[in-house]
Amino acid sequence: MDQQVTNLDRELRARALRVIPGAMWGHQNALRLPEGYPQYFTRTEGCRTWDSNGREYIDFICGWGPMILGYNDPDVEAAAVRQRSNGDCMNGPSERLVELAELVVETVPHADWAMFSKNGTDATTACITIARAGTGRRKVLLARGAYHGAIPWCTPSVAGVTEEDRAHLAYFEYNDAASLEALVEANKGDIAAIVVSAFRHDLGKDHELPTPEFARRARELADEANAALIVDDVRAGFRLDMGGSWEVVGVRPDLAAWSKAIANGHALAAVTGNDRFRDAATRIYTTGSFWTASVSMAAAIATIKKLRDTDGIGKMRTAGQRLRDGLEAQALRHGLKIRQTGPVQMPVILFDDDADRRLGNAFCLEALARGVYLHPTHTMFLSAAHTNADIDAALQATDEAFAAVARL
């Protein structure tokens, strides 16, 4: 590989620094990762990605979650091309809007209706707005440390945020029914919504599935307070259950926010809700020039049908378990202690006694050098395109990465 190509990522970063504040923003900024990660990419296929320097990786980030069937899935892309030939952003939606809403309502048990936007923050914000319109109340109860988007009411950063932006938010501990009960009592009479993630996936911490007891109590408390129970399913939607992630604990929300994987990489988000909040959803004003664009809706229809008809969740679960079992055996063999938490199709890997991330960062960099793209602190993602052969190839690289870490 010639030097010009080898340095392309570095050159692009330097150019970006002149015209983009900080050269990149948010979670896609490689500066938030250990030095050595690429910033720019050139192509993708299945479960593999190539960076701007031409290096190939087996990818366990999947575009930060959207690629649920795999990059460039032929059925999804064929549906998108067909729609694009007729129109995408028009004066109004195409019939794909109604078809997609019908399919979502058919697929998601709690949904009596659906509405669409472009990203997860749109959807979570709309859920809260609908809940406040439907209840006439102000307070929103959230799990401490949970991520729900990137605008002032919920962004992890406080830069540019005022106290007034978050004046009516209050925080409980995820999976702690007693802390939620106390918060409900403290805000009695003014609660619009209780908001929960599909599971606890705070950055850099062990992931934690909701206990059935906590989920049921959250549902009961929302009902007792005449408030909305909102599940933020932006990250996990369609990876745990086609009906919504809290189906696995037998609890259904009033409202749910979706994005990431629902259109296999095409920009789309959704709010689903029950009839109790249908009128409120018609009264709020939320919109965007691209929110009824048809290509992403055609892609979403193809994505949902293929996931449903090919047991996409089962494929991800099988691949994720194969990866988890292999990593556990490797770490044990090399005398390293790791914690693998969360659903197997959405793993996080953390090392014991590694508060400074030295071991986790070293492991991920060693894997990266061997063609496997992992993340040291964030939720990772399996796709239906990860085959046994892909997992086994990744495990060969991670075995060498563990060996390198054991020598530190």
Image (cartoon, rainbow, N blue to C red):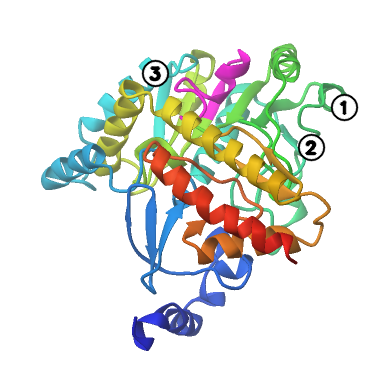
Mark 2–mark 1 CB contact (< 8 Å)? yes
Label 2 or label 1, whichever comes before in sequence order: 2
- Residue extending farthest to the left is 85
> Where is mark 2, residue-wise?
170
Work out whether residue 389 or residue 281 is closer to the camera in this orientation and state it: 389
Residue at the extreme bottom of the image, as rendered: 3
> Residue visible at 61% across and 73% down?
35
Q: Quick one: label 1, few (<14), some, or many (20+) residues within 10 Å?
A: few
Total numbered badges shown on the rendered structure:
3
Q: Amino acid at mark 2?
A: Ala
Question: Which label's residue is closer to the chain start, 3 or 2?
Answer: 3
What span is in magenta? Answer: 238-256
Residue type for callout 1: Ala
The disc labelled 3 sits on which kind of residue? Thr
- As for residue 309 lying within the magenta part, the answer is no
Q: Position of residue 17 (x, y in %)?
A: 51, 82
Number of the label disc, if any, that sits on residue 289: none
Marks 3 and 2, how far apart at CA:
32 Å
Q: Is residue 240 magenta?
A: yes
Spatial CA distance of label 2 from label 1 is 10 Å
Marks 1/3: CA distance?
37 Å
Observer able to see residue 76: yes
- In this view, the residue in front, 255 or 335, is 335
- Side of 214 relative to 327 (left or right): right
Q: Disc number at residue 186?
A: 1
Crowdedness near tag 2: few (<14), some (14–19) or many (≥20) residues, C-alpha within 10 Å: some
Determine whether 147 is above or below 363 in the image.
above
Residue located beneath label 3 in the image = 107
For marks 1 and 3 on the same chain, the one whose residue lies earlier in the sequence: 3
Label 2 element class: strand
In percent of width and height, residue 288 lies at 38, 47
